[in-house]
Amino acid sequence: MGALNTFPLSYKVQGKRIVIIGGGDEALNKARLVTKTTAQVVIISRQIEADFSGFEVEVIQRAFRPADLDNAALVFVAEEGADAELAKNEARSRGIPLNVVDVPPECDFYTPSIVERAPLTIAISSEGTAPVLARLVRARIEAMLSPGFGKIAGLAGGLRQRVEHLIQDGPARRRFYEALVTSPRVEAAVAISAIAGQSEAEALLERHVSEGSGQGAVWLIGAGPGSEDLLTLRAQRLLQEADVIVHDQLVPGVVVDMGRRDAERIDVGKAKGHHSFSQAQINTLLVRLAREGKRVARLKSGDPMVFGRAGEEIAALRQAGIVYSIIPGVSAALAAAADTATPLTLRKVSSGFVTATAHGADDADLTHWSALAQSGLTLALYMGKSIASDVAARLVAHGASATMPVGIVVNAGRPDMKTYSGNLQSLIESDVTFADGPAIIFVGEAVAAGDWANGAQLAARSFKVA
Ligand code: SAH
């Protein structure tokens, strides 16, 4: 004997009525759910209190009549009283499945949480006992499936006969369908229009028939600052679809672990016992993997387009004719601003912010930045931790005010985040040893508006060399 007291099934409601007795919020909740179907949804109550105007429903304000259940596939009772009792009895005597909202013993069926990508439906049921758990699971599944997934599933259905005719080999057919539901090109086309999706799907089919294999692709994915919950939903989904994950050293293990369990992982920051890969080697690697038909997640810290050498990788992919797309991520400066509640732009104080690399900055850069900082822009300097006091000294030498506020965030967006604050002068004089990890240096008047109280204050050395 099994363990389930209910049995999940897909019940036909097309051409029938779904009747909801009640006019309040609970009736509205059910309406929201059942208007996902093509059934005719009818709301009946003497008191209509909720606003049903956003839904395709027929609202009838009067007492319940037995004939209301003619041609009904399902009945929901979402109010109490004489009408409700009458409707329950009528549904039961007609054998129409009945749901009495929040009264499980009176229900013939429960409504699952639904992830809808018509015609694909995923229903999550806890037999009415753990709705919170069901909603959590639902949120995870939502994140896994692109919004256009159902349309792509529809495309697959429409192509079925041609695919069977054109691709005889079973595994090859399966590879085509896998490519279809995960192709970034088809996904992008479906988002534009059904016709665009159709023609992209047909092009993919032609390529499969002529080449006999799936086409690879490279996704340049922003991993964010290093916490798994600062990934975008799209990044998370593509990490689940990738065959290979190529990542930098700056992307922490917890984020790399978000990928599909059996995906191959290549750390181009430190290949076991070897030197790290050169940029040219990474470019070649990406092209080779894609040519082998693999879907490659090129995972970069923060946002791929900010100090990520994305430009070189994109040029190589373009030149090789490889399909690619870019998924943005939370750049370190933005995570650092969030951690310290520092508004990078602030009315009347800072009219913008500049991201720049402190590494290798020459005198011309420094003159430029000190002018920008003096003019009220916030500087967000990347790759500057080891040379922080030197950069501060040179900014002052090039005209920045020594009292200009400074804030430094090490490991922004991560559990081990640490902050330091002061001004250019105290940064020059401080002998602080920063915590391990990557850092962002903020310089500008707006920095003083942030919340730096929980961090270390940069202080001048206890003794000074005259
Ligand atoms: N593409 C990345 C930047 C890569 S360059 C992004 O958009 O964030 C590497 C530099 O980024 C580091 O030297 C450091 O300045 C910064 N950085 C990356 N991750 C960081 C983090 N979690 N906290 C603070 N700075 C970080």
Image (spheres, grey):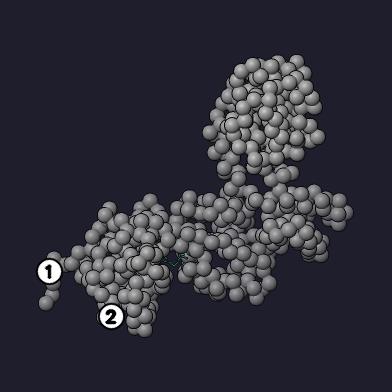
Residue in the image at 73% along x and 55% along y: 180
Q: Amino acid at mark 1?
A: Phe
* Numbered mark located on residue 432 in the image: none
| C-alpha distance separating marks 1 and 2 | 26 Å
- In-front residue for pair 52/313: 52
- In-front residue for pair 390/12: 12
Of callouts 1 and 2, the N-terminal one: 2
Q: Is residue 137 visible?
A: yes
Is 224 placed left or right of 421 in the picture? right
**Residue 364: image x %, image y %?**
36, 84
- In-front residue for pair 205/122: 122
Q: Amino acid at mark 2?
A: Gly
Residue holding disc 1: 463
Is 346 placed left or right of 98 in the picture? left
Residue holding disc 2: 399
Residue in the image at 32% along x and 77% along y: 370
Neighbour class for label 2 at 10 Å: few (<14), some, many (≥20)?
some
Q: Is residue 263 visible?
A: no
Residue in the image at 65% along x and 76% along y: 319
For this orientation, the residue located farthest to the right is: 165
Please, is residue 206 above or below residue 84 in the view? Answer: below
Q: Quadrant of ligand 1?
A: bottom left
Please, is residue 231 above or below residue 105 in the view? Answer: below
